[in-house]
Image (cartoon, rainbow, N blue to C red):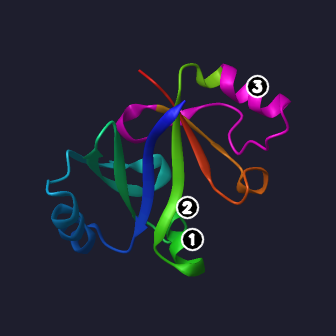
């Protein structure tokens, strides 16, 4: 496994992008809307990893709910795995609680799945299958 990206919940991409452009010295590499998750994403490369700024497109989206509960900030840590289905099976056998038993489509049309924070020391963990 390796760190794939950090997902950061923001109120507004328009306000947050200039901050990260100054901080990282570059413009976002990509941006897109992930309709299934009701989120707009701006992606900044950081070495072999990246930072994804996440803006809700609807208040009932996971990011909208996260911000309503307590605000902006780090929403999740994403780990890249070689075989997502196999990894989910092994983690469930090891006692981890899965939010997603099957993969779904995330940003960049990558296969993703989430682990419940109740079984990961309070951290929302996303797994993404390496292409």
| First along the sequence among labels 1 and 3 | 1
- Label 3 CA crowd tier, 10 Å (few <14, some 14–19, many 20+): few
> Disc number at residue 62?
2
User: Mark 2 and mark 3: span between their CA atoms?
Assistant: 26 Å
Taking the magenta stretch, the answer to whether it contains residue 105 is: yes
Q: Specify the segment rendered in magenta.
A: 86-110
Q: To which quarter of the image does residue 84 belong?
A: top right
Q: Earlier in the sequence, mark 2 or mark 3?
A: 2
Queried whether the magenta region covers residue 71, the answer comes back as no
Secondary structure state at the residue bearing disc 2: helix
Mark 2 vs 3: CB contact within 8 A: no
Helix, strand or loop at mark 1: helix
Looking at this view, is 23 or 5 the one in front?
Answer: 23
- Looking at the image, residue 81 sits to the left or right of residue 47; the answer is right
Q: Nearer the viewer, residue 107 or 35?
A: 107
* Residue tagged 3: 90
Q: Position of residue 101 (x, y in %)?
A: 72, 34
| Residue drawn at (29%, 46%) of the image | 46
Residue at coordinates 33% horizontally, 54% vertically from top-left? 41
Question: Where the C terminus falls, by quadrant?
Answer: top left
Q: Which mark is residue 65?
A: 1
- Badge 1: few (under 14), some or many (20 or more) residues near its Cα, within 10 Å? some
Mark 2 surroundings within 10 Å by alpha-carbon count, few (fewer than 14), some (14 through 19), many (20 or more): some
Give the mark toward the camera: 2 or 3: 3
Cα distance in 3D space between marks 1 and 2: 5 Å
Q: Mark 1 touching mark 2, by CB under 8 A?
A: yes
Element at label 3: helix
């Amino acid at each position: 496994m390796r760190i794939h990206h950090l997902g950061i919940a923001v109120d507004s991409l328009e306000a947050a992008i200039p901050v990260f452009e100054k901080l990282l010295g570059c413009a976002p590499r990509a941006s897109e809307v992930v309709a299934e998750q009701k989120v707009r994403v701006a992606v900044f490369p950081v070495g072999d990893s990246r930072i994804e700024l996440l803006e809700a497109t609807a208040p009932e989206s996971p990011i909208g709910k996260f911000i309503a509960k307590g605000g902006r900030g780090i929403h999740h840590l994403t780990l890249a795995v070689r075989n997502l289905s196999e990894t989910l099976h092994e983690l469930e056998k090891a006692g981890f609680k899965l939010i997603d038993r099957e993969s779904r489509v995330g940003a960049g049309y990558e296969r993703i799945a989430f682990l419940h924070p109740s079984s990961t020391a309070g951290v929302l963990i996303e797994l993404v299958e390496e292409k």
